[in-house]
Image: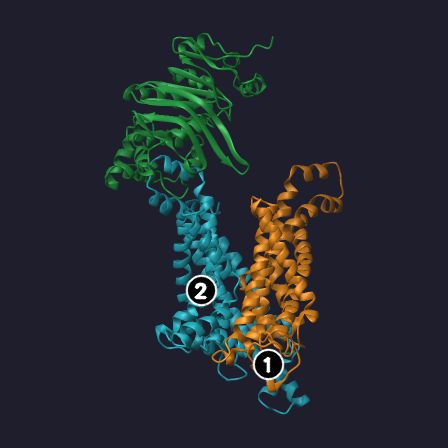
Amino acid sequence: MGRFLAKRLGSMLLAFFGMTIIAFGLIRVIPVDPVEAYFTMNQIPISEEGLASMREEEGYNRPLLVQYSTWLVDAMTLDFGESFVSKKSVTAELLQRFHVTLTLAATAFIMIVTVSLTVGIWSATKRGGFIDWLSRSFIFTLASMPSFWLAFVFVYIVALKWGLLPLMGWGSFAHVILPAGTLALGFIPYYIRLIRSSMLEEVNKPHVVFARARGVKESVIIRRHVVKGILPQLVTSLAMTCGGLLGGAAIIEIVFTISGVGRFVVESMFARDYFVLQGFIVMIGGLYIVFNFVADLLCALVDPRVRIKGDGA
Amino acid sequence: MLEIQQLSIWIQTENGEKQVVRDASMMIPAGQTVGIVGESGSGKTMLCHAVMQLFRDSRRYNGDILFEGRSLLAMDEQEMRQLRGNDIALIMQNPIAMFNPLVTVGDHFVETMQAHTPVKKQQALKIAAQQLARFQLPDPSILKKYPHELSGGMLQRIMIALAASLSPKLLLADEPTTALDTLTQLEILEELALYQQQTNTSMLIVSHDLGVIAKMADTIVVMRRGQIMEYGPADCILVEPVHSYTQALLAAKDNKYSLEQLVDAWTGEVSGELYEYRQGHWVRQEETSC
Amino acid sequence: MKKKIALISSSVLVLLLIAMAIFAPWLAPNDPYATNMALKLQGFSTDYPLGTDYLGRCVLSRLLYGARVSLFIALSVLVVTLFISMFVGLLAGYVGGIVDLVLMRICDIFLAIPDFVFALVIVGALGGGIRNMFIAIVLVSWVGFARIIRNMVRSLKESTYVQYARTIGVPKRKIMIRHIVPFVFPQILLLKLIGLGSTILLISELSFLGLGVSAPMAEWGMMISDSKTYLMSHPMLMFLPGIMISFTVLILNWFGDALREAMDPKAI
């Protein structure tokens, strides 16, 4: 188990460093000179000497590798510099909004897991009937709708027409339901289909037939043999989705005017506030490692073969 | 004990229905062992599944199967579930695929017993350990092991112990020794025979290997392409096979490697009616080519 | 039979969709860019079948022209990523060794960043506009497919007929063209077609954020974004483009599914 996790952690760290290179390189490929951008942003008159001294001061004249390593060391201590716009530290700005996005993403995550497991298992066991067909068609249609548009439709119907839930903003739990629900809806169809199809594959496996031949109750077969069998695959996919939820939150936060990390990042991007973007990529990269490591740990707990051989079967 | 009456089975495939068993009738008297021998695709495994009523959704049956006088085809799923594992137990081929890789051996026992009796987990594990000891697996730590940690031969023994743990009245063994090495095959057969003697359980053994059947069965059924070719007491069939297909099988009995080839090489047509060659010994009439 | 009906009817719908995009200039009742402040936010009428938007532009005409943008970008992304994925996948799979290792680690990095975040960052760095959105979508879309191709090539390489071709001394390049590409290509094309719907969704998301097409151009995601403020008074302005996106994606997804069913019952 130790070997398996170490191996996985190694490749995740590698990917993480790749992401830091992308984050660092970002500022080099942009068509705008960051120093000039800084000057314009702060309405400092641009002069050649001013630019040059700033470049010197910020180390833009040193070799790229040196620049990268100093940047990386700073990044590892969560120092991404100051936001051009607010003059506050990027880390502080991101952290200040992080709990909002986290609440949104976590609620959506719980919704995804509960709804997809319930509907997916149910539709797999009732396969072939009219209800199954109906739910599949519904899911298929749902999967085709852009989530930001659905968000507006919900706002219009649930909040504007019926007045059931608060329209926009943030504060109480009622504020979370609609945005989190919309965010979750973008992923639920995928998961229902994944659960349904992998369960149908699992149901035909010889060991499930054998369990039935031993007279084991159908509910026990589903719970212990079928659902347990699809868990490793499900957990791995969910880990990828966690990152997607944090990213997808941006669009939902904009629709519902919630000041979370996502909306902040999009706004910073329009303001060409590149240090924020850099910080955000590194943050996503760090979380990616956390999510995937937890997923691997869970897989190892469910599947004894991973624990022993050090390699998933 | 078990009576199969003119059973025909159709399975549903993508291209419509396909008949896999045609008008098969046989009886398994209490305490006796019946062996079905035939090549792969002869419908013998389908018969086992039919008795267990597995894959009900995708198969269609004609005829009837009576277990202690009750029709299995007429039973609903709930009644059938109570019968499976409890009154009729099945040992399947390829034991490695039959155990859930994510569940310990012990839990396989516990769930089987708890499906039929209100037994506590600890009690079930105790019974499981006793059952395993009976089939030459005295080490109780096996119960904590996962299937991939055990060999095919061990898993096959565990499967037999699992089937025996609720003392079924009828034991179906579908290719119980295929995919095992020769020595283990022999041991397992001996254990099965011993178990049969001790408990007087009725048994149905299915194999492509006439050697296995000859060792175990009181009555032999020879099948080919879903039809019974010859059906009678083992003493008669082994000594004096009537149908040319049985003769070919018997001639190849001791030569394992040529058996499958021989079965394939036998090109005779499956046709004609079954007739009673002797008391209790039925043979399918061969159409003479002259 | 059922499969055939699904395939034929979905293909017809896809063709209708493409026809709608191609013939938009003839189908549209009005100039999609002509503003008329006197006639802004009108309801349905004979002149403007689906009303007008906040600048008095014909909604129906803009919806029809919107199909051009989405389908054109999605199809170009398909073609370009097809080549990039094929190239990387074949290279990694066939050459193997250090090349494979490096390429796959690069894939790992791309896969680690959520698609939407990645596209956001690229468009953010390069600026908005069709060209940059196109680059961003290409960059996020090639990775998964490259890995699939690489795995396919690896298993094909072990197959007996490729092994045989190698033993009798068929040159590598010939093996690739004769035995590997013809096998891999149709399967990847199929997967790409299945993915068309999600590309359209990504385009609309980026445009909604204002990162895609620039102002006067008619694009569904941007039309939704434009109608935000009028949600209360003129919800139709927001509903219609969304319905267009949903229908387009639905048809493409259905077509992809039907094609997969028809081509390979084993499912990929």
- Tell me, by letter, which chain the rendering colours cyan: A
Nearest to the observer: residue B212 or residue B139: B212
- Tell me, by letter, which chain the rendering colours green: B
Figure check: B127 above or below B5: below
Nearest to the observer: residue C250 or residue A298: C250
Can you give x and y, in whole percent of width and height, for residue A195 in the image? 45, 52
Figure check: A143 above or below A27: above
Assign a secondary structure to mark 2.
helix
Q: Quadrant of the C terminus of chain B?
A: top right
Labels 1, 2: front one: 2
On the question of residue B3 being in view, the answer is: yes
Residue ID for mark 1: A58
Residue found 48% across the figure and 47% down from its top: A312
Q: Is residue C58 left or right of residue A283?
A: right
Question: Which chain's residue wears label 2?
Answer: A
On the question of residue A24 being in view, the answer is: no
Residue found 72% across the figure and 46% down from its top: C176
Can you give x and y, in whole percent of width and height, for residue A156 in the image? 45, 74
Can you give x and y, in whole percent of width and height, for residue A211 in the image? 37, 38
Residue found 23% across the figure and 41% down from its top: B120
Local crowd size for mark 1, using a 10 Å CA cut-off: few (<14), some (14–19), many (≥20): few
Residue found 38% across the figure and 26% down from its top: B64
Figure check: A204 above or below A194: above
Nearest to the observer: residue A36 or residue A218: A218
Local crowd size for mark 2, using a 10 Å CA cut-off: few (<14), some (14–19), many (≥20): many
Q: Amino acid at mark 2?
A: Ala
Can you give x and y, in whole percent of width and height, for residue A8 in the image? 50, 54
Quadrant location of residue C123?
bottom right
Give the Cα separation between the discs numbered 1 and 2: 42 Å
- Tell me, by letter, which chain the rendering colours orange: C
